[in-house]
Image (tube, rainbow, N blue to C red):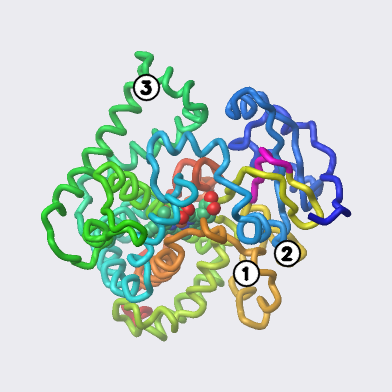
Amino acid sequence: MSTALEALPPQRVEPIQRLNPFRLLPALLKLRFRGDFSDVVTYSYSIKAGLRAGFWPVRFVYLHRPELVEAVCVKNDKSYIKPLGIEGLRRFLGNGLLTSEGKFHLRQRRMIQPAFHKKRIDAYAKCMVDYSLKRTEQWKDGQELDIHTEMMGVTLEIIAKTMFNAEVAGDAAKVAHALDMITGYQERYGIRWVGKIFDALPLPSTRRLLKAMAELDAIMYRIIDEHCGAEEDTGDLLSMLLQARAEEDGTIMSGQQLRDECLTLFLAGHETTAVLMSWTWWLLSEHPEVEAKLHEELDRVLEGRPAAMEDVDKLVYTRYVVTEAMRLYPPAFGFGRQAIEDNQVGPYLIRKGTIVGMAPFLMHRQPEWYPEPEKFDPERWTPERSEGLPKFAYCPFGGGSRKCIGDQFAWMEATLLLATFAQGWKMRVLPGREPVPQPLVTLRPKGGVPVVLEKRTLAAVS
Ligand code: HEM
């Protein structure tokens, strides 16, 4: 470790002092909008977070430079684990890919990775388009609806079909409810023993939460049971996992582990893309000039027929729109790590125990890499304009060994969903109903995105 280490900037004491990591982002945003924003922000010990660490104070550092984020996620990967707060998610998701650590995580990742190879993902394209078209069958010109609920519904159907070969249209309301409960109550479980007390107390909220989780588990186990006995890989992840054997010891996954992995993919794999699509519809509604260019490309490339996997590479502007929407509203707005040993990040010494936060939401708005950062400008992603952008200046899927396993799936899904829905429909956000970012587990649009549907005429489509 180099001797010429710089001291971390002094800790901020207002107004974030009282906040725990989950509430930090809005506070940082306020600082940013006041122009009081630096590359590295350290902040004070929070009592709550100290409790999570077992009564030891914890130091938090937020890093906002690409090379520092890269150092934590890639170069010094072995010096970090997921931060304390992950315990809240572990309570619900168990020990799946998102929450597991070390050798076990690596073993599971190796077993699951083949389901995300390019050939597999290409095969999912038709399902993505079919479910999108099916959803619009009930839509009517001039109808008002919450496009966020629609996007949650369609991405849920797609993840269930592609990963588990299951139909879940009838379960959407239960899954959405369980997700709301997990999102709302995960903080309560940030400290394991406190969570256990909550579980034991006859509180109405605990009863509702446990009931929602039991319903979600019932759906998951029903899907797993439907596959048991199947002797071959039928193209979906679950049938593959039932056949999969660990490289190291040739063992198969236990029922509990299957449940944890499937539930993780079920939840991680649909709300994120749905959130991205919802923000995209809002941005397009606000920027008719971008929408017109998008329509021009869709009409020219698709000539009125449904999009297919072969079109994805040709839908260049469509991809720019997705990329830019995810710059401004990254569904995973922030992620974190905790140092398990002292390590050097750029010029800084990060001490063992420190929680390091990295926020794509803030990184993606740094004027140094994104001139006029608040502007929705899909063409900033042309090769000429995006050349030279540091690798981690755009990091909606994280990086290193914990990088999103579904990134290629998500790119394809978002491109095909945008193409399919925008080909036939415009969404107009109702005046005065602009969505507000709500940073929970994902960056949800608070209160949904109410729109009026406008059918595009056949003349315009053909
Ligand atoms: C726009 C859509 C998506 C975004 C923005 C997104 C973002 C992320 C991010 C930032 C991480 C890393 C978190 C960390 O480092 O702590 C992650 C991990 C993960 N994502 Fe995604 N994700 C998306 C879609 C998906 C999809 C479609 C799937 C599955 C089909 C998926 C499954 C997962 C899993 C299992 C992990 C944990 C990976 C590991 O630790 O090995 N995600 N995602």
Q: Residue at x 71, y 45 (%)?
A: 342
Q: Amino acid at mark 1?
A: Asp
- What is the quadrant of residue 310 in the picture? bottom left
- Mark 3 is surrounded, within 10 Å at the Cα level, by few (under 14), some (14 to 19) or many (20 or more) other residues, namely some
Q: Residue at x 71, y 62 (%)?
A: 67
Q: Residue at x 70, y 43 (%)?
A: 28
Q: Residue furthest top?
A: 202
Relative to 249, does residue 178 appear above or below in the rendering? Answer: above
Is ligand 1 less than 8 Å from the beta carbon at label 1?
no
- For the residues labelled 1 and 2, say whether their Cβ atoms are less than 8 Å apart: yes
- Mark 2 is surrounded, within 10 Å at the Cα level, by few (under 14), some (14 to 19) or many (20 or more) other residues, namely few
Q: How many marks?
A: 3
**Mark 3 to mark 2: distance in Å?**
46 Å
Q: Is residue 278 visible?
A: no
Residue position marked by numbered label 2 in the rendering: 372
Residue position marked by numbered label 3 in the rendering: 206
Residue 212, given in percent of the width and then of the height, sits at 30, 32
Residue position marked by numbered label 1 in the rendering: 377
**For numbered disc 3, what is the local secondary structure?**
helix
**For numbered disc 1, what is the local secondary structure?**
loop
Q: Amino acid at mark 3?
A: Thr
Q: What range is drawn magenta here? A: 351-358
